[in-house]
């Protein structure tokens, strides 16, 4: 008990110090400049600096200390987020889908048009469904769909292919429940977006039916991490320089087709929406995926926002760029559901 308390105290002090140092220097970086108006730009850039400091600090921790820090954030979100979710007219409950724990977020009116299976980001090593409560509620409200955020297994305790196996289990369970393929979407951000694309590879091998659509927010689709934007945008993005792919793969070839989806045929993919920023480190690999989808005649909606960083719709959903992506998601789900269920 004393050891855990001491670790938690050390983590909090270190995080506060790192964030404070970063934000004190923020005014020197002209935070009023950017892709939006002056006031929103300040919010966007301060968010960028604060999250960048947080991720840098977390990436420096040992696995044990990282889990303590993650547990603290998870507990805080469980306490603080329920009123935020309720204010959006969304109800939530813990659940289990295909043996994988998670949490449902449902519009209160009880007339969900469809279902979204959501896989959170975190580099395959971190974050929890509770940390996604606000965004999952927002996604449920804007899409009029029920959203299941899966608490899939994380590395290094559970390396590849544990996350993919959990994703397959969630999808199979959804397909045998009330979620018809024509009303089912699969979504994710960052590593969760990469997990969705890996799931498409697995569904072909297991001959599972196609879903209504994919929603990918800044997906991590190439774990070789060798594209020019990885270094070109390192100073502009929120991601730490040491993206934790090795602890997830643990010796597996990062170019394997169900790991880095840009090495996999995409012609049979369902309609796909991809949102990303021009200033993020994964930009080049996402652009390549978009080109491959378009060349494969996949119905593709690609949104590249100038000057925006990794997973900006989640971190700054109130920004003009964030609102454009949310509006696109709303139009995408509505259109797919109408096509699948014509009156």
Image (tube, rainbow, N blue to C red):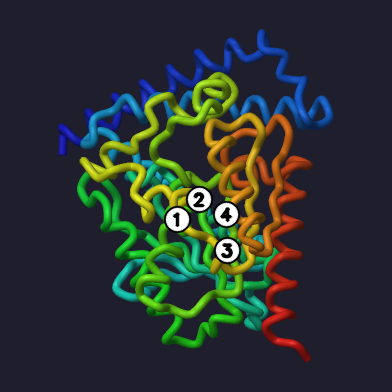
Give the percent coordinates (x, y) of residue 259. 37, 50
The residue shown at (53%, 16%) is 22
Nearer the N terminus, badge 1 or badge 4?
4
Query: Between tags 1 and 4, which lies in front?
Result: 1
Q: Position of residue 253 (x, y in %)?
A: 28, 43
Task: Reply above or below: 342 against 303.
Answer: below
Determine crowd level at label 3: few under 14, some 14-19, many 20+ residues with C-alpha closer than 10 A: many
Lower sequence index among marks 1 and 3 = 3
Position of residue 70 in the picture relative to residue 335 (left or right): left
User: Secondary structure under badge 1?
Assistant: loop
For marks 2 and 4, the one nearer the N-term is 2
Quarter of the figure that contains the C terminus: bottom right
Q: Nearer the viewer, residue 88 or 242?
A: 242
Q: Residues within 10 Å of mark 2 (few under 14, many from 20)?
A: few
N-terminal label among 2 and 3: 2
Q: CA distance from mark 2 to mark 4?
A: 27 Å
Instruction: Give the distance between the C-alpha atoms of the residues marked 1 and 3, in whole angstroms.
Output: 16 Å
Count neighbours of disc 1 (C-alpha within 10 A) and say few if under 14, some if 14 to 19, many if 20 or more.
some
Q: Are marks 3 and 4 in contact (CB under 8 Å)?
A: yes
> Are the two marked residues, 2 and 4, in contact with CB atoms closer than 8 angstroms?
no
Residue occupied by mark 2: 80
Q: Can residue 93 be seen? A: yes
Q: Which mark is residue 214?
A: 3
Q: Position of residue 37 (x, y in %)?
A: 84, 29
Q: Say which of marks 2 and 4 sits in front.
A: 4
Alpha carbons under labels 3 and 4: distance apart: 6 Å
Classify residue 64 by image quadrant: top left
The numbered mark, 1 or 2, whose residue comes first in the sequence reads: 2
Q: Which residue is mark 4?
A: 216
């Amino acid at each position: 008990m004393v050891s855990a308390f001491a670790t938690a105290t050390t983590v909090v002090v270190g995080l506060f110090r790192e964030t404070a140092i970063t934000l004190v220097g923020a005014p020197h970086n002209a935070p009023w400049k950017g892709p939006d108006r002056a006031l929103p730009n300040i919010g966007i850039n301060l968010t960028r600096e604060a999250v960048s400091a947080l991720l840098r600090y977390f990436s420096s921790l040992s696995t044990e200390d990282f889990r303590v820090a993650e547990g603290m954030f998870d507990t805080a979100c469980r306490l603080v987020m329920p009123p935020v979710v309720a204010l959006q007219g969304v109800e939530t409950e813990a659940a289990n889908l295909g043996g994988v724990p998670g949490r449902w977020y449902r519009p209160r009116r009880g007339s969900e048009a469809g279902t979204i299976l959501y896989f959170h980001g975190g580099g395959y090593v971190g974050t929890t469904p509770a940390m996604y409560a606000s965004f999952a509620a927002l996604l449920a409200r804007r899409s009029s769909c029920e959203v299941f955020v899966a608490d899939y297994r994380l590395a290094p305790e559970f390396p590849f292919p544990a996350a993919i196996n959990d994703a397959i289990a969630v999808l199979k369970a959804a397909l045998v429940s009330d979620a018809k393929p024509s009303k089912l979407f699969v979504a994710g951000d960052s590593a969760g977006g990469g997990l969705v694309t890996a799931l498409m590879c697995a569904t072909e091998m297991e001959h599972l039916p196609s879903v209504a659509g994919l929603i990918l927010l800044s997906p991590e689709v190439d774990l070789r991490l060798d594209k020019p934007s990885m270094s070109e945008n390192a100073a502009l993005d929120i991601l730490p320089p040491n993206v934790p792919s090795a602890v997830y793969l643990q010796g597996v070839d990062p170019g394997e087709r169900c790991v880095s989806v840009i090495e996999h045929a995409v012609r049979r993919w369902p309609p796909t929406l991809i949102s990303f920023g021009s200033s993020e480190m994964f930009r080049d690999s996402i652009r390549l995926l978009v080109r491959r989808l378009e060349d494969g005649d996949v119905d593709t909606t690609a949104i590249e926002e100038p000057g925006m960083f990794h997973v900006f719709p989640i971190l700054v959903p109130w920004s003009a760029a964030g609102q454009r992506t949310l509006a696109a998601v709303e139009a995408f789900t509505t259109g797919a559901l109408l096509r699948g269920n014509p009156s």
